[in-house]
Amino acid sequence: QFLTELEAGDHFGEMSLFASDLRTASIDALEDCICLTLENRKIQEIINEDSPLSMKLLRSFVKSLAVRLVEVNSRLAKH
């Protein structure tokens, strides 16, 4: 089932960082693209630092998860 379309600079898979590697979806590219893959361990190291980058990542992850939750809630309310 198609859930959403991501744009350049978007990220996915962040839920697994906070839910014991839980995977709730898969992703397919609609066209050729370049993806950066980061290991969970490395992301956790960055997040655990007290730095502007760690805060920027956390804000981005929370915003993304919140937007997706609102989208899901909206879809469920229509059914």
Image (tube, rainbow, N blue to C red):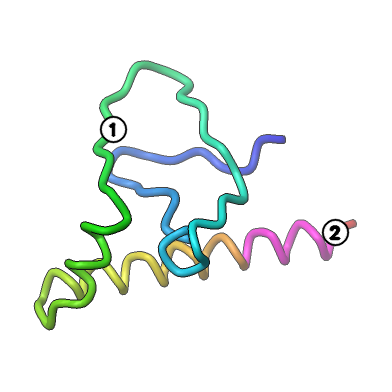
Where is residue 6? Give x, y as percent.
44, 40
- Under circle 2, the secondary element is helix
- Above or below for 30 versus 68: above
Q: Is residue 16 left or right of residue 50?
A: right
Please say whether residue 71 is one of the residues in the magenta stretch: yes
Q: Amino acid at mark 2?
A: Lys
Which of the labelled discs sits on residue 72, or is there none? none
- Under circle 1, the secondary element is loop
* Nearest to the observer: residue 66 or residue 41: 41
**Residue drawn at 41 percent across, 63 percent down:** 17
**Residue drawn at 57 percent across, 42 percent down:** 4
Which quadrant, please, contains the N terminus? top right
Q: Is residue 55 left or right of residue 61?
A: left
- Give the distance between the C-alpha atoms of the residues marked 1 and 2, in whole angstroms: 33 Å
Q: Amino acid at mark 1?
A: Cys
- Above or below for 45 versus 27: below
Where is residue 74? Give x, y as percent.
73, 63
**Main SS of residues in magenta:** helix
Which of the labelled discs sits on residue 78, or is there none? 2
**Residue drawn at 34 percent across, 47 percent down:** 10
Q: Which residue is mark 1?
A: 35
- Above or below for 56 versus 2: below
Magenta part of the chain: 70-78
- Residue at far bottom of view: 50
Residue density around tag 2, few if under 14, some if 14–19, many if 20 or more, within 10 Å: few
Where is residue 13? Give x, y as percent.
44, 51
